[in-house]
Amino acid sequence: MVGACDTFDTQVPSVISPNSVQGQALARLWGGDVERLDRELHEALADATPIAEIQKAGKTSRYPVGTVAAVPQGGRRVFFLAHSEMNAANEARATTDGIWKSLLSLWEAVSRHANGGAVSLPAIGGGQARIAQILPPQDSIRFIAFSFMLASRKEKICDELRIVVQPENYDLLDRLELQAFLDSLEMT
């Protein structure tokens, strides 16, 4: 899963940070080919309806927070998840409500497109989403795991969920507390 803003901007470095998960995905999975990624995102969003236009540099069509673009990439799918809103200054902003809604949309898309394989996603909310003070990595992991557990009670999502944390945040995690929290969730 790659976090995105509601405009699905891709232009590195003018709009998207090359150090973000999206910037790294562009470089590693699409070889820096922004035009190809834009075409594939456009195809993946063919059934989604923009809700507004915004005047800014970069893409201007806004999609609802929670929109998922499932982009085929080699033998896998990359799920671009609109979890934040972009403003006219190209600053992405997320909210806990928007992230929760986005996660629920993600699990539906994964269930529909992923064939039960492993799914990897970063701890959501840090970096460019500008919500780390409200949803630090420790809480983000709990948020993701709890939403996954609830969605899994409705239907099978995938065989394995991998939550990826940046190395500088890993040492800050209370891993014993996280393990106790994960153990308390009854996954079905």
Image (cartoon, rainbow, N blue to C red):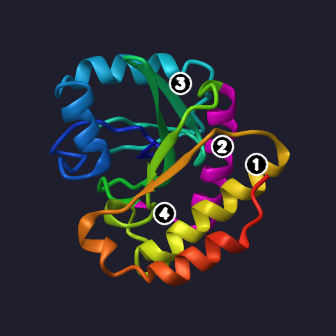
Look at the image and say whether residue 94 sits in the magenta stretch.
Answer: yes
Label 4 sits on what residue type?
Ala
Look at the image and say whether residue 156 sits in the magenta stretch.
Answer: no
The residue labelled by disc 2 is 107
Mark 4 or 2, closer to the camera: 2
Residue 84, compared with residue 46, is above or below; it is: below
Residue lying at 58% horizontally and 39% vertically, measured from the top left: 67
Residue 43, compared with residue 65, is above or below; it is: above
Q: Quadrant of residue 178?
A: bottom right
The residue labelled by disc 3 is 45
Whole-number angstrom distance, CA of label 2 to CA of label 3: 17 Å
Label 2 sits on what residue type?
Trp
Residue lying at 53% horizontally and 38% vertically, measured from the top left: 118
Instruction: Say whether marks 1 and 2 touch (CB < 8 Å).
Output: yes
Whole-number angstrom distance, CA of label 4 to CA of label 1: 24 Å
The secondary element bearing badge 2 is classed as: helix
Q: Earlier in the sequence, mark 2 or mark 3?
A: 3
Q: Which region is colored magenta?
A: 93-112
Image spot of residue 112 (x, y percent): 68, 27
Residue 57 shows up from this direction: no
Q: Earlier in the sequence, mark 4 or mark 3?
A: 3
Whole-number angstrom distance, CA of label 4 to CA of label 3: 21 Å
The residue labelled by disc 1 is 152
The residue labelled by disc 4 is 94
Decide: few, some or many residues near mark 3? Use Cα within 10 Å; few <14, some 14-19, many ≥20.
some
Front residue of 70/145: it is 145
Q: Report the side of 14 relative to 157 (left or right).
A: left
Label 1 sits on what residue type?
Ser
